[in-house]
Image: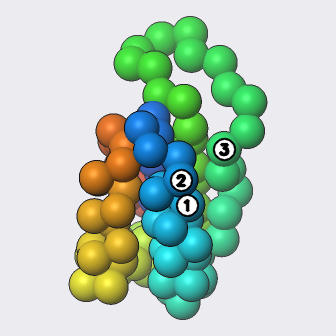
Amino acid sequence: MPKGYIIGHVTVTNPEAYQAYITQNTPIIQGYGGRPLVRGGQSEHPEGPEYSRHVVFEFPDYASAKAAYHDPAYQEVAQIRRDNATSMIVVVEGV
């Protein structure tokens, strides 16, 4: 069964407030079997819109990734990200 992924490209506008998002989303993601593969770090932007932060979470399957993103508790926490960053999030099935 293919794994699932949540991929985010983010530019944080309020780093202090954004920390609450990181702290609060981690246990929700872990509850669905998610684990970080990329969480910040150096990056290069050779094409497309530039974001300053990139994250990739791997899940046991696509259904788990979708469930984590749509979980009401996550959506509540996601508002912190929306209020303190610009972002593009995608939930995708692996190969």
Locate residue 22 relative to residue 44 in the image: left or right: left
Q: Determine whether the residue tagged by mark 1 lies in a helix, strand or loop.
A: helix
Residue 3 shows in this picture? no
Mark 3 is surrounded, within 10 Å at the Cα level, by few (under 14), some (14 to 19) or many (20 or more) other residues, namely: few
Locate residue 66 relative to residue 59 in the image: left or right: left
User: Which residue: 49% across, 74% down?
Assistant: 25
The label on residue 19 is 1
Residue lying furthest top in this view? 46
Mark 1 touches mark 2? (CB < 8 Å):
yes
Locate residue 82 relative to residue 19 in the image: left or right: left
Mark 2 is surrounded, within 10 Å at the Cα level, by few (under 14), some (14 to 19) or many (20 or more) other residues, namely: few
| N-term mark: 3 or 2 | 2
Instruction: Pinpoint residue 22: horizontal percent, then vertical percent.
Output: 55, 65
Circle 1: residue type? Gln
Q: Which residue is mark 3?
A: 40
- The Cα–Cα distance between marks 3 and 2, rounded to whole angstroms, is 15 Å
Q: Determine whether the residue tagged by mark 3 lies in a helix, strand or loop.
A: loop
Compared with residue 50, is residue 15 higher up or lower down, i.e. above or below?
below
Compared with residue 90, is residue 32 higher up or lower down, i.e. above or below?
below
Locate residue 76 relative to residue 16 in the image: left or right: left
Instruction: Pinpoint residue 19: horizontal percent, then vertical percent.
Output: 55, 60
User: Which residue: 56% across, 10% down?
Assistant: 46
